[in-house]
Amino acid sequence: MSENTELEEQLAHLTKTVEEMSDIVARQEKEISLLTHRVRTLMEREAERQQDAGGHVVLGDERPPHY
């Protein structure tokens, strides 16, 4: 095999790999966007549920009432 043929094969392999990775990244971007939307929706629902249950929303860094 000539050096040019080997380089062409490597280039073809790398091109295929880059295209596959690009597809994976695009798919992951869509999934992350969907999951971010779902988490935001769940957080909003929980905040509303907490407000309806007593008007108090617990924050992550807030000390519990028994301290």
Image (tube, rainbow, N blue to C red):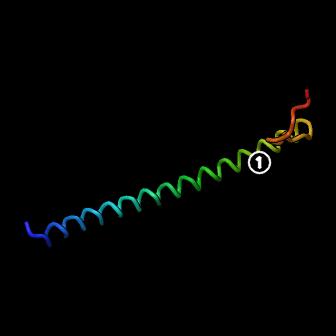
Residue pictured at 35% horizontal, 59% vertical: 20
Residue pictured at 65% horizontal, 48% vertical: 38
Q: Quadrant of residue 6?
A: bottom left
Task: Give the residue pinned by disc 1.
Answer: 44
**Helix, strand or loop at disc 1?**
helix
Residue pictured at 39% horizontal, 59% vertical: 21
> In the picture, which quadrant includes the C terminus?
top right
Residue 33 located left or right of residue 66: left
Residue 61 located left or right of residue 66: left
Residue 27, position as x, y percentages in the image: 47, 56
Residue 22, position as x, y percentages in the image: 41, 62
Residue 26, position as x, y percentages in the image: 47, 60
Residue 66 located left or right of residue 59: right
Which of 28/61 is in front? 61
Residue pictured at 71% horizontal, 49% vertical: 41
> In the picture, which quadrant includes the N terminus?
bottom left
Judge whether 40 appears above or below 62 on screen: below
Residue 8, position as x, y percentages in the image: 19, 70
Judge whether 46 appears above or below 11 on screen: above
Q: Amino acid at mark 1?
A: Glu
